[in-house]
Image (spheres, rainbow, N blue to C red):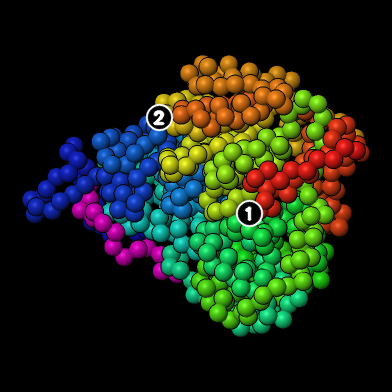
Amino acid sequence: MAKNNNNQGSSAKTSATRTEKTVLTKSGAEVLIDTVLANKIDSCWGYPGGAILPFYDAMYGSNLKHYLVRHEQAAAHAAEGFAKATGKVGMCIATSGPGATNLVTGITDAKMDSVPILALTGQVATTAIGTDAFQECDIYGITIPITKYNALIRYADEVADITETAIRVAQSGRPGPVLIDFPKDIQVAHTARLKPGKLPIPPRHYEKPPVVGDLARLADAINRARAPLLYVGGGAIHSGAYANLIKLAEKAQIPVVSTLMGLGAFPGTHDLSLGMLGMHGMAYANKAVQECDLLISAGARYDDRVATDKSDFASQALRAHIDVDQAEINKRVKVDFYIAGDLNDVIAELIPKVKQVKERAWVTFCRDLKAANPLRFNKNGSFIKPQQLIYRLWQKTRGEAIISTDVGQHQMWAAQYYAFNGPRQWLTSGGLGTMGFGFPAALGAKIGCPEKDVVVISGDGSFQMNMQELATARMYNIPVKIIVFNNGFLGMVRQWQELFYENRFSSSDMDYNPDFAKLCAAFDIPAKRITADHEVEEALDFLLNTKDVCLIEVAIPREEKVYPMVSSGTGYREMVDFDSSKEAGDEVKIIPNEPAARDGYVTRGKK
């Protein structure tokens, strides 16, 4: 925390006063508001309470727009959604004690997925800290391991410097969450320090890092490779490397696979795109990883959902790693060489060093992998298949909507069947896997991108985690579109119990679910429930054409599974794909990221 410079002003009843020396002063709360506005943060989500009330009073009538959520966790996720969709810092606010601790899941989620959010928490007065005062909680100590930077403000003179520092740190290098704990007495205390001065941490913590590593060696490896593969992660989106990744891939004819968090960093329907790899990735993407001779990780971290068996991950290849966070290099998987630095800067410097390639046999091989290993499921009678509904949603939105998901089977179906052609279209909880993320994140995204269609894809389990935010959506008329798949189970849990626990469905059956359409009626929100395949087209039209927030509940078979699947601890060679012989009905084959797919590339075959 910053030190006292013994220049603190006294509190006053007026919002701005002049002392005998005609020095302008403002309250700590006003200074914080001015500082966030100066950093182009003009929206926030929160829930008031005693220890943060002076800040809320100062915010009244200011240019900082506040959205009242119904639970503080939703405030953190809304800030995440805003940040993910816009690239700006999202802001959330809570009071002390339970308000602050309710932010912890969202802050942790932001840390895992490198999302720049500013969490502001009220705190008891400085004179009461350490006395177990009403709603006192050491949120500063709690959040040390889950923030990039946090501070407990002790003097009004520190407010501008600490706030400026927090915002810069949140956005720099590998983005992430920051937290400011703001005691009640400091919110009302006045100071003449209205703008930030010298910041209390070294510049290396908030300035862009230099590029470190042998770019010439990486370029030479690309030029010599027979079968190079780009492995793109969320860092590509954070760095704004979209255009340069396309230039590099096209110049050197390098196919591209994406992590869950990297979807949209490279166009999903590009001829060189192989879609998502990993535990529930495309079979052709996983097979390409095992066949490549050079794997270049670009803003991805070789995590356990991708390198499921690290001893057999791209075992035939030289492995390179480009990352802004040097702590990620050689963390799980040993690489042959690395470049540390901002990904967009690295790629920009790399492009002139690689040779122009007209055509590679390897690219043809990857196209053949696609054709031979499409996504597959069986269509049986009138049952609604979630895969096909999401695919139709993609076609109807021309792949241009922002999709926000919760966590579970529906998340993987959305990642597989909705091909993202641009960055910041895909909002999901990757590292932490937070159920309840999708709906509030969508609210934040819609505020940040009002011109875009924002669609929530959720499940009956996940949606009930934060469904109280229907009130927030209605109160502010935030027109997000909600799809709730209802299979009466915690679907991913059930899938694992069926495959690995001999059908012992322990506590995964949702014995009672609400009628989600009737629930929406209580909030005056239009909604429909569909149970048969012939209702899908009309329901999607209703969803996309309704101008207000709306919802469709979609009944799906409880036995439906996500394929392909690589179970924990096994490698891609043990990948389990869909077996149509084990289910009734006609097999449907789809290659969602095939360029022709947007016009309806679906093939069916009778068994």
Image quadrant in which the C terminus is located: top right
| Numbered disc 2: secondary structure | loop
Going 56% across and 40% down the picture, which residue do you hit? 397
Quadrant position of residue 247: bottom right
The prevailing secondary structure element of the residues shown in magenta is: loop
Residue 268 disc label: 1
Q: CA distance from mark 1 to mark 2?
A: 33 Å
Disc 2 packing (10 Å; few <14; some 14–19; many ≥20): few
Of residues 414 and 150, the one nearer the viewer is 414
The residue that appears at 40% across and 41% down in the rendered structure is 44
Query: Which residue is identified by label 2?
Result: 476
Name which residue type carries label 1. Gly
What is the quadrant of the N terminus in the image?
bottom left
What label does residue 281 carry, if any? none
| Dots 1, 2 in contact, CB < 8 A | no
Residue 514 vs residue 465, the one in the foreground: 514
> Can residue 199 be found in the magenta stretch?
yes
Q: Residue at x 57, y 29 (%)?
A: 541
x and y percent of residue 152 in the render?
41, 50
Of the pair 361 and 446, the residue shown nearer to us: 361
Q: Is residue 498 above or below residue 339?
A: above
Magenta segment: 190-204
In the image: residue 126, left or right of residue 575: left
The image shows residue 593, relative to residue 295, as above or below, that is: above
How far across and down, in percent of the image, does residue 589 sit?
79, 44
Please tell me which residue is depicted at 65% across the width and 45% down the height of the picture.
Answer: 599
Q: Secondary structure at mark 1?
A: loop
- The three-letter amino acid code for the residue at tag 2 is Tyr
Select label 1 or label 2 by which is in front: 1
Q: Where is residue 396 shown, x and y percent of the image?
A: 59, 38
Q: Is residue 547 magenta?
A: no
- Say whether disc 1 or disc 2 marks the residue closer to the N-terminus: 1
